[in-house]
Image (spheres, helix red, strand yellow):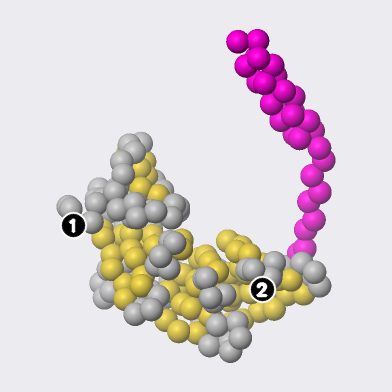
Amino acid sequence: MRKVRGILASLLFATAAVAQQPVEIKEWPVPWTDTRPRDPAVDRQGRVWFVGQQGNYLARFDPATAKFDRYDLEKGSGPHNCIVGPDGAIWFAGNTAAYIGRFDPASGKITKAPMPAGMASDPHTLVAAPNGEIWFTAQVSGYVGRLDPKRRAVKVVKVEGSGARPYGIAGASPELHATRNAQLATGSTPPCCTRRGIVAKRRGRR
């Protein structure tokens, strides 16, 4: 018992020592004012990608050179977040234009995966799964969806309950968790947050 207490004391001391170490925070102002830059993602080269939701752009920042590069999207796209794919491509949610886009940094080419007609019209937050699929939420329309990047095929499922508003999504397993009514359940899509708690569905179930 004394040995266990000694180990715990050592761990607590080490944790306290780390917590007391100063952390340097460096900031770089985004050169495009009033564009609502958000949701950064870091690629393998250490460059930071982000979107300008009100400015309708995708951007890249290189901390080594402090250089910003901007890639304009069509007006009204309203990108909400972006992620880096395993091949280095940048995927982003065209939140107000009902599509998920793929940007190729080498060519500058953008390809789109449109949302199913009449459903999930506002792709919101994307997350990559280990198998290469992209899961996403559609907050206002109330859906959680899955994109197959190879076929550009999109499947969506309605989140049950009025006003669920699925927001963030996380987890990289074959299971989905969403937040609703402060309840936690496991299903077959990754974790996502709604206004009211945590919900989930299994594939093939209602």
SS at badge 2: strand
Q: Looking at the picture, how far across and down is residue 156, in whole percent?
A: 28, 65
Q: Which mark is residue 204?
A: 1
Against 177, is 81 above or below?
A: below
Give the residue drawn at x 80%, y 69%: 64
**In this view of the protein, which residue sits in the foreground, 97 or 152?**
152
- 27 drawn magenta: yes
Q: Is residue 28 left or right of residue 150?
A: right
Q: Looking at the picture, how far across and down is residue 35, in whole percent?
A: 62, 69
Q: Which mark is residue 60?
A: 2
**Mark toward the start of the polypeptide (2 vs 1):** 2
Q: Looking at the picture, how far across and down is residue 165, in whole percent?
A: 36, 53
Against 146, is 168 above or below?
A: above
Per the rendered image, the range of residues in magenta is 1-29
Residue 124 shows up from this direction: no
SS at badge 1: loop
The CA span between labels 2 and 1 is 40 Å
Main SS category, magenta section: helix
Give the residue drawn at x 42%, y 81%: 112
